[in-house]
Image (spheres, grey):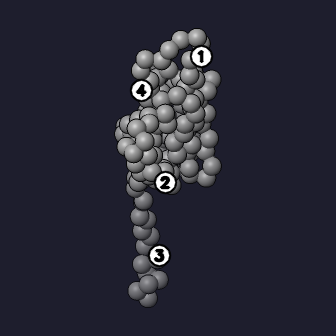
Amino acid sequence: MLLRNTDPFREFDSLARQMLGTTNRPAVMPMDAWREGDRFVIEFDLPGVSPDSVELDIERNVLTVRAERVGRNGDWEMLASERPRGAFSRQLVLGDNLDLEHIAAAYDDGVLRLVVPVAERAKPRKIQISSTGDQHAALSG
């Protein structure tokens, strides 16, 4: 398995938004994930987030993505506020079949793209079977 979402507060946040009518804190960063041959690709939508505020951490097999979308300050009146602001994060539990030492990350046009190669030990391989006449003779004799 590539990944499992770990967000214990996701349902609580959704319920709070429904009950309180707030959209100040996003439940998750929108994400797509797919496999391309011997690598997995994960993309997170982070429009309006400065590349300097994006942090990636990995501990054991848990990948944490943190980002912050700073609110605008000034002497003006907000007419609509639907885009979440502030700090938010997302954690993914990555499978043992991935090479976590060689994750590549790029941030372009508000999309954070991670490329995670499949570990060599998880790739399909053929095992050669050897046969020697001496072993066969020793077994039958």
Residue type, label 4 = Glu
Residue highlighted by disc 1: 73
> Which residue has dot 2 on it?
8
Residue 21: mark: none
Q: Quadrant of residue 56?
A: top right
Secondary element at tag 4:
loop
* Tag 2: amino acid: Pro
Distance from Cα at disc 2 to Cα at disc 3: 61 Å
- As measured in the structure, the alpha-carbon distance from the residue carrying label 3 to the one carrying label 4 is 77 Å
Q: Position of residue 110 (x, y in %)?
A: 47, 22
**Label located before the other in sequence (1 or 3):** 1
Of the residues tagged 3 and 4, which is closer to the observer? 4
**Residue placed most toward the observer, 87 or 99:** 87
Quadrant where the N terminus sits is bottom left
Left or right of residue 121, residue 140 in this image: left
Looking at the rendered image, the disc whose residue lies closer to the viewer, 1 or 3, is 1
Q: Is residue 54 visible?
A: yes
Q: Disc 3 on helix, strand or loop?
A: helix
